[in-house]
Image: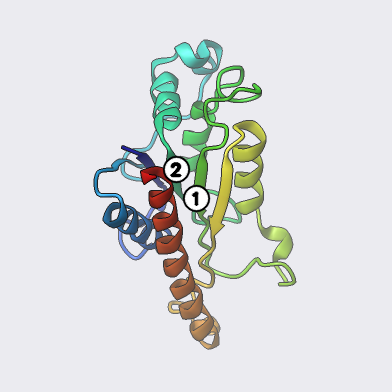
Amino acid sequence: MATLLHIDSAVFPQGSASRDITAAFVQAWQEQHPEGKVVYRDLAAEPLPHLDFAAVSAGVDNPLRAELAAELEAADAVLIGAPMYNFTIPSTLKAWLDPVIVVGHNAGVPDSPVAGTPVTVVASRGGSYAPGTPREDFEFVQNYMEKVLTGMLGAEVDFIVPELTLAHSRPEMAELIPLAEASRTKSLDEASEKAKALAVRFAA
């Protein structure tokens, strides 16, 4: 029985693009793999404390860090909702990453228990930061998440990127609504396809 660790970090409980996409992923996973297990953390509803000196010093002996690390290491696949806030990830997501990454235990070691774990990151954003766009240099979500998850943990990272999510609420972006809808549809399809593929992979 495969385990999916599902992390949401969007502050909005409703109307969140990243939550909509992660929900579609989980639904497809469960339909394809009903005997699988889903472990869920809503970091906006139940935020974690920021890492402090005592927790850093204790490493994996800190109870919370041990719990979070064990949860990550027990997962066969990981799903992370990472909306862009002020050009980077939500502080609640950073507050999960900091304690869950334990140098010498699951990070910075050649035999990390997280190495090879497939991680799907839903990196939603209100505008577009794709290569060639005016704000390409302001993209610090995919760049950061890819580096920290692969470079420190050795995970296999894949992204789903719903763009232009503010088009419906910003009059100055009204002409971009068709592109926003296309991006949303594409992201929902990708979520379903990726979830089904992983479920089949672990059911084999």
Which three-letter amino acid code belongs to the residue tagged 2? Val
Viewport quadrant of the N terminus: top left
Viewport quadrant of the C terminus: top left
Query: What residue appears at the point 44 percent right and 43 percent down from the top-left corner?
Result: 78
Quick one: 135 or 180, which is closer to the camera?
A: 180
Label 1 close to label 2 by CB (< 8 Å): yes
Residue 181 versus residue 155 in the image, above or below: below
Q: Examine the rendering and report whether any part of residue 21 can be seen.
A: yes
> What x and y, as percent, mark residue 111?
61, 22
Quick one: 165 or 195, which is closer to the camera?
A: 195
Residue 50 versus residue 204 in the image, above or below: above
> What x and y, as percent, mark residue 158?
56, 52
Query: What residue appears at the point 48 percent right and 35 percent down from the top-left corner?
Result: 95
Query: What residue appears at the point 69 percent right and 59 percent down from the top-left corner?
Result: 138
For disc 2, the neighbor class at 10 Å (few under 14, some 14 to 19, many from 20) is many
Lateral position of residue 56 relative to residue 3, left or right: right
Quick one: 2 or 185, which is closer to the camera?
A: 2
Residue that numbered label 1 is attached to? 120
Residue that numbered label 2 is attached to? 78
